Amino acid sequence: MRARGIELIAVGTDWYGVTATQDPLAALAALGPGTAVLVKASRVAGLERLAAQLVAR
């Protein structure tokens, strides 16, 4: 996926073949202007906070 310019960031799980981040909000700091983000999550993981931060940007 990286060859296509896609980066996967997993939160709280290693199911996706990448090392999981424990601080998803810190990952937002690396996003530049024009960056597209797909949030595939559930409320169990608490990622609605991450989605809210993305919308607020």
Image: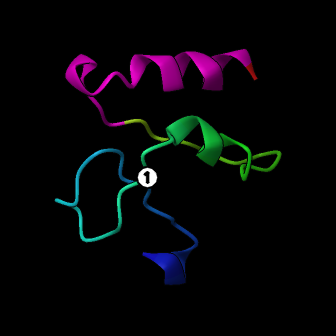
User: As displayed, is residue 4 above or below residue 21?
Assistant: below
Is 47 magenta? The answer is yes
| Residue 29 in the figure: left or right of residue 8 | right
Tell me the magenta residue range. 40-56
Q: Which quarter of the rendering shows the C terminus? A: top right
| Residue 24 in the figure: left or right of residue 55 | left
Residue 20, position in %: x, y? 35, 57
| Residue 19 in the figure: left or right of residue 5 | left
| Residue 55 in the figure: left or right of residue 43 | right
The residue drawn where x is 29% and y is 45% is 12
Residue 44, position in %: x, y? 20, 21
For mark 1, what is the residue?
Answer: 21
Is 43 magenta? The answer is yes
User: As displayed, is residue 20 above or below residue 17?
Assistant: above
Tell me the SS state at disc 1.
loop
| Camera-side residue of 1 and 14 | 14
Q: How many marks?
A: 1
The residue drawn where x is 33% and y is 69% is 18
The residue drawn where x is 59% and y is 35% is 25
Given the current orientation, which residue lies at the most extreme bottom position? 3
| Camera-side residue of 5 and 47 | 47
Residue 32, position in %: x, y? 79, 50
Given the current orientation, which residue lies at the most extreme right position? 33
Residue 48, position in %: x, y? 41, 17
Given the current orientation, which residue lies at the most extreme left position? 15
Main secondary structure type of the part rendered in magenta:
helix
Residue 17 sits in quarter:
bottom left
Task: Name the amino acid, label 1.
Answer: Thr
The residue drawn where x is 74% and y is 45% is 29
User: As displayed, is residue 3 above or below residue 19?
Assistant: below
Q: Which quarter of the rendering shows the N terminus? A: bottom left
Mark 1 crowdedness (10 Å alpha carbons): few <14, some 14-19, many ≥20: some
